[in-house]
Image: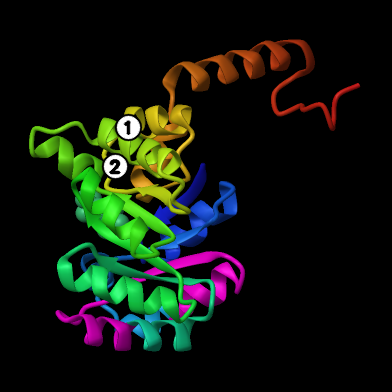
């Protein structure tokens, strides 16, 4: 499962990137708005930091297919070929996906709440389909199961599209999709930090150090011990 950061805060991206093995960054218009900066200013800075080979996902804004394609052209022109153009999975969006795919531009179908949206996006040539796990849960559905079913639909129908699960609010949602072997998950920095935060682990490490210091003295490590 690819592991992607869902944020546009450059300080947070740097912090996560420097610790975790990360495959790229996703953004959406709301995430960009939160940065308070002009879109291409912040996106260029992210691209420069993650390098030309990492995935960067950037969403179109135009309401019609032709406008979405023009948005896509500009996104790829400014941010490079490993940039995935995120297109909402609406009727206009599906048409834009077909057009962008025909030009060899990489597409992430976004705003996916149903299995059939994902199926149609994959048929239209999308490389990724992004089900919104937690938003589906909030509507009384089962976001994890929806993402798993989409993964199965792609495999059973021989569709060359990966699930890029999005909108996570807790570790359990991420873990269940990791166990299932979906293609990718995009996760906010807070939820990424929560994946490794564990008081029992912290207490175990603290006890090891205390015992060792009891033997060798405070501040002594394996580098400095006799
Ligand atoms: C992907 O980039 C989606 O836009 C994003 O994960 C949605 O997350 P949210 O439901 O937390 O806004």
Q: Disc 1 vs disc 2: Cβ atoms closer than 8 Å?
A: yes
**Mark 2 sits on what residue?**
168
Left or right of 197 in this view: 27: left
Residue 59 vertical placement versus 131 (above, below): below
Q: Does the closest atom of ligand 1 sit within 8 Å of the Cβ of label 2?
A: yes
Between the C-alphas of marks 1 and 2, the distance is: 7 Å
Please state the horizontal and vertical placement of residue 6, each as a whole percent of the image. 36, 56
**Mark 1 sits on what residue?**
173
Residue at 22 percent of width and 48 percent of height:
116
Q: Is residue 49 inside the magenta stretch? A: yes
Residues rendered magenta in the picture: 44-71
Asked if residue 59 can be seen in this view, the reply is: no
Q: Is residue 43 inside the magenta stretch? A: no
Under circle 1, the secondary element is: helix
Q: Nearer the viewer, residue 221 or 198?
A: 198
Q: Quadrant of ligand 1?
A: bottom left
State the mark number for residue 142: none
Residue furthest to the front in view is: 157
Residue 171 vertical placement versus 66 (above, below): above
Q: Quadrant of residue 17?
A: bottom right
Asked if residue 25 can be seen in this view, the reply is: yes
Q: Quadrant of residue 35?
A: bottom left
Residue at 19 percent of width and 31 percent of height:
142
Q: Nearer the viewer, residue 222 or 36?
A: 36
Please state the horizontal and vertical placement of residue 188, each as a whole percent of the image. 35, 50
Q: Nearer the viewer, residue 196 or 220?
A: 196
Task: Give neighbour class at mark 1: few <14, some 14-19, many 20+ (Cα, 10 Å).
Answer: some
Please state the horizontal and vertical placement of residue 176, each as a whole percent of the image. 38, 27
Residue furthest to the left in view is: 139
Q: Nearer the viewer, residue 86 or 220?
A: 86
Q: Quadrant of residue 127?
A: bottom left
């Amino acid at each position: 499962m690819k592991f992607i950061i869902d944020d546009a805060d450059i300080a947070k991206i740097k912090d996560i990137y420097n610790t975790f093995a990360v495959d790229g960054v996703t953004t959406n218009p709301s995430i960009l708005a939160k940065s308070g900066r002009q879109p291409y200013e912040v996106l260029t800075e992210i691209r420069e930091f993650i390098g030309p080979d990492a995935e960067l996902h950037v969403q179109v804004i135009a309401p019609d297919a032709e406008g979405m394609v023009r948005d896509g052209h500009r996104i790829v022109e400014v941010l490079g070929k490993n940039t995935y153009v995120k297109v909402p999975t609406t009727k206009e969006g599906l048409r834009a996906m077909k057009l962008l795919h025909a030009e060899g531009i990489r597409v992430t179908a976004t705003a996916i709440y149903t299995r059939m949206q994902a199926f149609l996006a994959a048929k239209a040539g999308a490389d990724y389909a992004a089900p919104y796990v937690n938003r589906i849960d909030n509507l009384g559905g089962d976001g994890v199961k929806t993402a798993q079913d989409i993964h199965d639909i792609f495999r059973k129908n021989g569709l060359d599209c990966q699930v890029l699960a999005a909108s996570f609010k807790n570790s359990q949602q991420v873990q269940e999709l990791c166990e299932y072997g979906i293609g990718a998950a995009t996760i906010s920095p807070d939820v990424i930090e929560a994946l490794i935060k564990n008081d029992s682990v912290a207490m175990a490490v603290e006890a090891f150090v205390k015992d060792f210091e009891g033997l060798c003295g405070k501040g002594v490590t394996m580098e400095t011990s006799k």
